Amino acid sequence: MTSSLLCAVAAAAANIAGAAAVVTRRSWSRATLELLIALSAGFLVSVALADITPEAIARGGERAGAVILAGFVLVHLTQHALVRHFHFGEETHPVSQQVGASALVGLLLHTFVDGVAIASAFAVSTTLGMFVFTAIVLHKLPEGLAISSLFLAAGYTRLAALGAGTALGLATILGVLATNAIAPLAEYGLALSAGVTLYVAGSNLIPEFQGKPGWRHNVAFFGGCVLYFGARAVVRW
């Protein structure tokens, strides 16, 4: 539990750092952010399909498939069906406070499952735990940036925007604690996290750079895949 909790704290810090970058008006490169999102998408897709999903099915059998689907559908419901305006990255258009609040609720579910994923993966092996942690922490910075900029665009104070990013981080830590305390989460947490991870990569991150001119984003995406399989090969060797 110690390793998973420490990783959850590190992931939470990345959420807060992303929010702080917006609140303090520190400059950042949009191009670099887009490349980070593309790299994260490649790594997330790879770890979800090559490690999390097979391990979840091996442990949960046929039921794991239904839980994976449930995780996928649940994130779509909270982030896009109930929330009409949400994307990773800086928000540049005015939105209502209701949109900001509903987006936070949707992301809280997602970040809670991030913690479930970390704890469930470490319960299998330290190697899988570190891969899942890496996949999660890569998109934590743009996630914190997204919610804080959305809050500011909705007219909330800077303190509230920073608080929203902090709440996402705390939800991740809570996910770890809940997984170690609640038996059904420990049993099906890996399957749930597989569905959420696939949705975040395929529906949240990839659309952020699809259609962008040039090859940089595609290279970053494929680089994320190569990075994962390269690290996996080194660990196994």
Image (cartoon, rainbow, N blue to C red):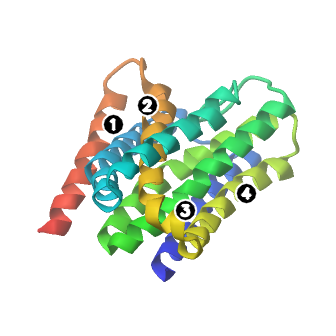
**Residue 206 image label:** 2
**Residue 167 image label:** 4
**Tags 3 and 1 in contact by the CB under 8 Å rule?**
no
Question: In the image, what residue occupies the spot 64% across and 49% down?
Answer: 109
8 vs 63, nearest the viewer: 63
Mark 1: give few (<14), some (14-19) or many (20+) Cα within 10 Å.
many
**Residue 229 image label:** none
- Left or right relative to 210: residue 164: right
Mark 2 or 1 closer to N-term? 2
Mark 2: give few (<14), some (14-19) or many (20+) Cα within 10 Å.
many
- Is there any visible trace of residue 111 in the rendered image? yes
- Is there any visible trace of residue 197 in the rendered image? no
Mark 4 or 1 closer to N-term? 4
**Tags 4 and 2 in contact by the CB under 8 Å rule?**
no
Mark 4 or 2 closer to N-term? 4
- Left or right relative to 63: residue 170: right
Name the front one of labels 4 and 1: 4
Q: Percent from the top left, x then y, of residue 48?
A: 35, 48
Name the front one of labels 2 and 1: 2
Q: Which residue is mark 3?
A: 115
Question: In the image, what residue occupies the spot 38% across and 45% down?
Answer: 65
49 vs 9, nearest the viewer: 49
**Residue 221 image label:** 1
Where residue 16 sits, quadrant-wise, is bottom right
Question: In the image, what residue occupies the spot 60% across and 72% down?
Answer: 177
Mark 3 or 1 closer to N-term? 3
